């Protein structure tokens, strides 16, 4: 018997079940993870490491080709800022009237948009934001530790990981002073220090009120991470393969999920993990579960860095403009925007041009902007910015969804928590606010 699981393609996955696995493995519980992005891949890895037989279902020809493909690349374990906060509704109104503002809203006929917005507004309170931030910081620290463990199997240099530190810059004096006054905020830098310690900002330091720096934050290529982890999974002794086919519907009977209808045929397993980004909403609904998810469309630009360019060495976040800058290998990655336009993945030329103008203003010499590549992705977000991890009313269906723009940051920690729950172990910290029952 070969020492590794076969790679399962579309042509031979018509009826994958426990009986199709070699006899030696029938006694091992079989779990299908739905979704081949960074959250699904890390879930599959942690479950396989825990002793489960795992199959990954991914609708695209390649893993990591959705929201994980060209995201911001920042691993912000200690800096989390839930979108829902006191004062955000008023700011959002102003953003809507800014030509290059961070928010764009297009009303839909879909009731999901209005339900999500109503819940979001209910979360825009300082006390709710504090509770959510505390919980996300716990998940972030767990993710940092889990990523370090994973480095034994997936070397950091294989996906461009870099301990860059994080600098959050502020344009408003009042906002900067408020942030700097918070306990444990980090190193407070003047505009001159921002330009001196991160030369990529030198041309824009006159626009800044100051910055706050924290060491220990990292940047990496999320798509490269997905590809590397998929390769390690393919040779894992408990991994049963990748099925490339779209999940269409969950079938349920007597309090359990019995199978998945897919474009590759009917798939069955002992248990199922839903980690399919915004598609999770539709799949959960097919089994009568309402997930409070909405796709927040984000954009990114990637530009090559030339020898004489002054690209940032530190990971930079422009707080008011909601723009992230990260040097990933030999390219500058810039990510921004929150477009509430439904499941529309089209590149909007005005949004791309507006982001490019902001980049040229802030870091004019950081990369070759004549060779920029634009991308848009749908980030599946909950109204309160906290992911949903854990059980459902079905005894064999588990969730790992709703990470919004922080999927890469929280992926390893979420996978670790999920695996503990599947095994019946107590999680490392209380999960209030991180489960389907908020």
Image (spheres, helix red, strand yellow):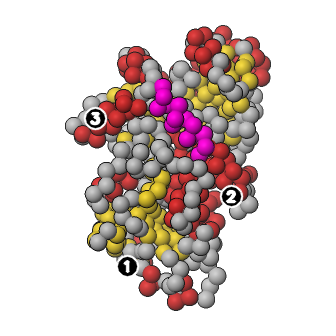
Residue at the spot x=56%, y=41% of the render? Answer: 136
Which region shows up in magenta? 126-139
Residue 42 shows up from this direction: no
- Classify mark 2: residues with Cα within 10 Å, few (<14), some (14-19) or many (20+): some
Q: Secondary structure at mark 3?
A: helix
Image position, residue 6 (x, y; %)? 55, 78
In what element is the residue under mark 1? strand
Task: Select label 1 or label 3 by which is in front.
Answer: 3
The picture places residue 334, in percent across and down from the top left corner, at 57, 33
Callouts 1 and 3 close, C-beta under 8 Å:
no
Q: Is residue 272 visible?
A: yes
User: Which quarter of the image is occupied by the N terminus?
Assistant: bottom right
Q: Residues within 10 Å of mark 3 (few under 14, many from 20)?
A: some
Q: Which residue is mark 3?
A: 114
- Tell me: residue 30, above or below residue 188: below
Query: CB under 8 Å between callouts 1 and 2?
Result: no
**Res 228 → quadrant:** bottom right
Q: Which mark is residue 163?
A: none
Image point (65%, 18%), residue name: 181
- Mark 1–mark 2 Cα distance, whole angstroms, equals 32 Å
């Amino acid at each position: 018997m070969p020492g590794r699981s076969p790679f399962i393609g579309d042509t031979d996955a018509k009826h994958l079940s426990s009986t199709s696995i070699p006899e030696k493995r029938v006694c091992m519980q079989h779990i299908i993870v739905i979704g081949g992005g960074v959250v699904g891949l890390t879930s599959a890895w942690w479950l396989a490491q825990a002793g489960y037989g795992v199959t990954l279902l991914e609708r695209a020809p390649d893993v990591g080709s959705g929201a994980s493909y060209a995201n911001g690349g920042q691993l912000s374990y200690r800096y989390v800022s839930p979108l829902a906060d006191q004062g955000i509704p008023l700011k959002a109104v102003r953003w809507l009237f800014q030509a290059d503002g961070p928010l764009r809203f297009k009303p839909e006929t879909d009731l999901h948009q209005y339900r999500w917005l109503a819940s979001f507004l209910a979360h825009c309170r300082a006390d709710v934001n504090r509770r959510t931030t505390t919980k996300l910081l716990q998940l972030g620290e767990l993710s940092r530790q889990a990523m370090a463990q994973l480095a034994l199997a997936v070397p950091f240099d294989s996906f461009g990981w870099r301990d860059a530190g994080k600098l959050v810059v502020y344009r408003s004096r009042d906002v900067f002073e408020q942030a700097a006054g918070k306990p444990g905020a980090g190193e407070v830098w003047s505009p001159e220090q921002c330009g001196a310690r991160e030369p990529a900002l030198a041309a824009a330091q006159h626009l800044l009120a100051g910055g706050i720096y924290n060491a220990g934050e990292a940047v990496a290529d999320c798509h490269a991470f997905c590809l590397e982890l998929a390769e390690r999974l393919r040779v894992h002794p408990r991994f049963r393969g990748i099925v490339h086919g779209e999940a269409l519907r969950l079938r349920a009977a007597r309090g359990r999920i019995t199978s998945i209808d897919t474009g590759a045929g009917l798939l069955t397993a002992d248990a199922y993990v839903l980690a399919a980004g915004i598609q999770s909403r539709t799949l959960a609904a097919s089994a009568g579960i309402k997930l409070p998810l909405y796709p927040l469309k984000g954009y990114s630009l990637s530009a090559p860095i030339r020898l004489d360019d002054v690209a940032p060495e530190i990971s930079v976040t422009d707080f008011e403009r909601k723009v992230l800058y990260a040097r990933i290998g030999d390219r500058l990655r810039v990510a921004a925007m929150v477009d509430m336009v439904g499941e529309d993945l089209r590149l909007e030329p005005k949004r791309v041009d507006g982001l490019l103008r902001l980049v040229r203003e802030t870091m004019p010499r950081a990369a070759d902007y004549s060779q920029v590549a634009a991308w848009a992705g749908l980030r599946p977000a909950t109204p309160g910015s906290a992911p949903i991890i854990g059980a459902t009313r079905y005894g064999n269906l588990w969730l790992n969804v709703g990470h919004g723009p922080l999927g890469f940051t929280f992926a390893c920690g979420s996978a670790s928590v999920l695996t503990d729950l599947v095994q019946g172990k107590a999680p490392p910290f209380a999960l209030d606010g991180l489960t389907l029952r908020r």
